[in-house]
Image: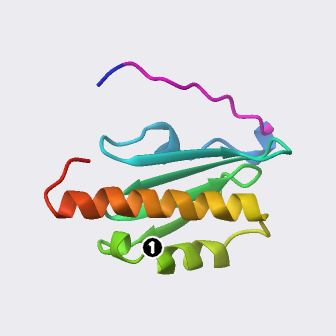
């Protein structure tokens, strides 16, 4: 693996709490997504074969998590689950979450079929 290619500063205040450890110490093979909206609010998404996690700036302490060894085979259910547990988000944020879930699902379903992560 090469050197890191992106460094992102947390734009939220200390009162919002620290970024979740899983977003900082990403396991090998995990899918990671970052989003910043037009108001500078940040979000992170991390998926592994057994779980999908989402945290939104301003509420880092309460990330959403879908833990299920078969989650990658049901992207619509995961998107709906995450959308139901999120604060009111705009269309751009929801499109990003769906894109992350579908990309991660594709990656992990490919690995199940014998492809590379």
Q: Is there any visible trace of residue 5 in the rendered image?
A: yes
Seen in the picture, residue 57 relative to 5 is either above or below; the reply is below
Residue annotated with mark 1: 75
What is the crowding at mark 1: few (fewer than 14 residues within 10 Å), some, or many (at least 20)? some
Kindly report the secondary structure that dominates the magenta region of the rendered protein: loop
- In the rendered image, which quarter is residue 67 located in? bottom left
Q: Position of residue 10 (x, y in %)?
A: 70, 34
Q: Residue at x 36, y 47 (%)?
A: 30
Seen in the picture, residue 60 relative to 89 is either above or below; the reply is above
Q: Is residue 62 magenta?
A: no
- In the rendered image, which quarter is residue 48 located in? bottom left
Depth check: 74 or 14 in front?
A: 74
Residue projecting furthest to the right: 39
Q: Is residue 9 magenta?
A: yes
Judged from the image, the secondary structure of the residue bearing numbered disc 1 is: helix
Please state the extent of the stretch shown in magenta in the rendering.
3-13
Residue projecting furthest to the top: 3
Q: Position of residue 110 (x, y in %)?
A: 24, 59
Q: Position of residue 29 (x, y in %)?
A: 30, 44
Q: Position of residue 26 (x, y in %)?
A: 41, 41
Residue projecting furthest to the left: 114
Q: Is residue 100 left or right of residue 49?
A: right
Seen in the picture, residue 14 relative to 35 is either above or below; the reply is above
Q: Is there any visible trace of residue 62 in the rendered image?
A: no
Q: Quadrant of the N terminus?
A: top left
Q: Is residue 110 left or right of residue 51?
A: left
Depth check: 91 or 63 in front?
A: 91
């Amino acid at each position: 693996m090469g050197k890191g290619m992106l460094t992102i500063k947390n734009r939220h205040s200390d009162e919002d709490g620290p970024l979740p450890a899983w977003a900082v110490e990403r396991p090998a093979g995990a899918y990671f997504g970052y989003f910043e909206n037009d108001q500078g609010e940040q979000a992170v998404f991390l998926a592994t074969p057994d779980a999908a996690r989402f945290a939104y700036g301003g509420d880092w302490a309460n990330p959403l998590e879908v833990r299920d060894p078969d989650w990658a085979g049901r992207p619509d259910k995961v998107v709906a689950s995450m959308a139901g547990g999120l604060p009111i988000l705009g269309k751009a944020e929801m499109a990003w979450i769906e894109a992350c879930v579908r990309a991660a699902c594709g990656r992990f379903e490919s690995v199940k079929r014998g492809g590379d992560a």
